[in-house]
Image: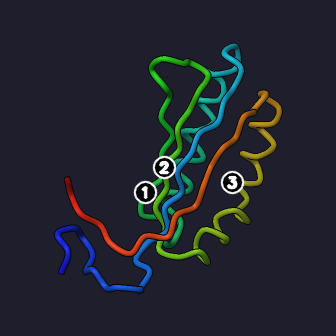
Amino acid sequence: MGRGHFPRLRGKLLTIAVIGRFRFPVETVEQARLLMQDVIAATLAEPGCRAYSYAQDVAEPGLFHVTELWDSRECLSAHFATPHMQTWQHQRSALGFFDRDISLFELESEEKI
């Protein structure tokens, strides 16, 4: 077994990680933060969601970092179809959401460092 939460199984997918960043104009950051609280709470209640968070960058106030962990691609796909994500997509566009750079990673092991 690996030292993390999950056994190390060569070639077997153990989790999906989504990592990236996006921006809001500084003047809409506070509104966006309030809306993020709702989407985070709803997403954490979804089946297969292990972690879901947004973090505001300390050096650039309009920059946010996103980190997500999912049991499978199917769970992530279902997430994008939820009503709260549809609402969030419209809300964030209205607030000037831009510079989205988010990637999906397939992880085979986890180890605490």
Q: In front: 18, or 82?
A: 18
Relative to 86, 14 lies left or right: left
State the separation of the CA atoms marked 3 and 1: 16 Å
Relative horizontal placement of residue 90, taking residue 70 as reference (left or right) = right
Question: Which residue bears the numbered disc 1?
Answer: 51
Q: Are marks 1 and 2 in contact (CB under 8 Å)?
A: yes
Helix or strand or loop: what does disc 1 sit on? strand
Q: Earlier in the sequence, mark 3 or mark 2?
A: 2
Q: Which residue is mark 2?
A: 67
Residue at image coords 66%, 16% = 26
Mark 3 belongs to which amino acid?
A: His
Front position in the image: 27 or 11 = 11
Q: Which mark is residue 100?
A: none
Which residue type does callout 2 highlight?
Answer: Thr
Q: Which numbered disc flags the more N-terminal residue, 3 or 1?
A: 1
> Residue 43's image quarter?
bottom right
Query: In the image, what residue type sits under mark 1?
Result: Ala
**Front disc: 3 or 2:** 2
For label 3, the residue is 84
